[in-house]
Amino acid sequence: MPFKTLAPPGRPRGSLVVSDEEFAHDRTAVLDRLRDSGDLDFGPAVLDPAHIGDIEGSLGTISMRDRAPRRGWWVRLVTLAAIMGPGIIVMTGDNDAGGVQTYTQAGQRYGNSMLWVLLGLFVVLFVAQEMVTRLGAVTGVGHARLIRERFGRFWNLFSVGDLFILNFLTLLTEFIGISFGMAYFGVPKTYSVPAAAVLLFTFAATGNFRRWERFMLLAVLASLVFIPCFFLAHPTAGPILHGFIPGVQGGVTGSAILLIVAVVGTTVAPWQLFFQQSNILDKRITPRWLNYERADTLIGCVVTTIAAGGMIAFAAFALNHTKAYGPNATYTDSGWFNDAIHATLGSTAGSLAAVMLLVAAVLGAGAVSLSTSYAFGDTFNQRHSLHRTIRTAPVFYGAYAGQIVLACAVVLAGSDHLLGTLTQYVQVLAGILLPSAILFLVLLCNDKEVLGPWVNTTWQNVLDYTIIGILVVLSMILVISTLFPSIDAVVLTEVLFAVAAGIVVFVVLPLVWLARSRRISAGGPVDRLADVRDLDRSTWRMPPLNRLAPATMSTARRVGLLGLRTYLVASALLVAVKVFSSFVH
């Protein structure tokens, strides 16, 4: 039966008719022809025809025409295996080279006392990435493109501008991790860094999504090397359980707060939002399979949180109580950590620690660099898909190669001390800029033109804005502690959280109630989701972008967004000044 384009009511079917054989032989080329002819200018908002077709996962394939029900656990597990990828890759890539350094530094300096931070971050991580899974599967459009279409080019450039800078700095930390990991085995960075760059580009630029995903999933599997590392440190249950009680070994100080913000930044980073949404498009996941992608994301959250905790505990049991490498020792970089593990636990543990760093760096570099390329394609309206070859997506692969080459050059030219210090502060910058990234995410997830019946519920919004508020307060604690190092960090934390709670109770809640009352008195519905609640979730997808009603930006929202962005950028600049001063002194 020939494949035909479908048209909305009142419009004739597409003029092009393509046989099943031709469609199966070169699906992307056929869909390119249909898009160029105008016959795909309707239906879902998918912008790149390469994002239409079968789900070609590493562990299975699902036909785009598959409508069979999934009954029985075995069938569901097979389906999950085929869909699994975007969630577990983005989550495991989150524990990158910067993550390894930040987590092990936390364990070396503060023992197991920061494990409790991971419990809260698990919630933040899943909440943020669950919103991304809905946006990706329901809209068929990348995160940067949605921001551009719904908020305008100014906010798009504002959001991706710091993303590009932060992603590049993060990519530097990945190649720094590669250089330190291979240096442990005697391989100089002049060989290891270029070799890693060639490897990353080779697997990404083959025009085969499945091949790239298999490479990344192998790296995910290799990242489980943290398990033998953990047991080689001879852990005991008591200190680990005690670490989940809020508190900090030695008391809360400015340095402890700085490290907590770094833990936040390496556990939930802005690049993850852009990466997973576009990777879901690349995998061709639609709303029918959204629950499976949520499961993929949840599994990734569990794995990455356990891994982060394992790294903290590994460093805590191995180094925290030693004289030479304990909390008073200066943690300089991941190379120092590998040597410290070698000195305290032996060569086997040192080698495994170096492998742990190396795998994390490769996995992180592959995901972060692709996040930049995806966002670049969205912003400048270029085709961007791993299903495409260099010939059909030259700008996408050019951006991918360019950032890798430049990052390699900087790492090869920079000193190890400078690069090692940079790693921690990049995670801090990510933590500072995270609230604005999540804010745009929440606004998109409340846009009924974009998500229809998939928009956030009231309880989801309460949770989301609570998370944003806590992240902003953390950044304020960091900024004030940096400007006034003599201030009592505990008192500062208590005061700022009390002020934030007061603002919510006496300002935010009355304003929300007032807005609701005005809407109802003007004849609006009591239930804000009344017009979308009865739509069929399994089939609803966002229409083409040019058919959406224009988004409205109130003056209050514009002022709020601009104020938040200005504050966060100023905070980031303050951290940059702190980094520069640390190098000078």
Image (cartoon, rainbow, N blue to C red):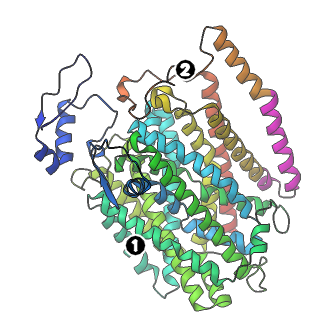
Q: Disc 2 marks which residue? A: 530
Magenta stretch holds residue 55: no
The furthest residue to the top: 522
The kind of residue tagged 1 is: Ala
- Tell me where the magenta segment starts and ends, as one range: 480-506
Q: Residue at x 83, y 39 (%)?
A: 499
- Distance between the alpha carbons at the discs numbered 2 and 1: 52 Å
The kind of residue tagged 2 is: Ala
**For discs 2 and 1, the disc positioned in front in the rendered view:** 2
Can you say whether 2 is above or below 400 in the image? above
Q: Quadrant of residue 211?
A: bottom left
308, 296: nearer the viewer? 296
Residue 125 location, x and y as percent?
A: 59, 52
Residue 410 location, x and y as percent?
A: 47, 67
Classed neighbour count for the residue bearing mark 1: other residues with Cα under 10 Å, few (<14), some (14–19), many (≥20): some
Q: Earlier in the sequence, mark 2 or mark 1?
A: 1
Mark 2 residue element: loop
Q: Residue at x 63, y 78 (%)?
A: 230
Q: Which mark is residue 196?
A: 1
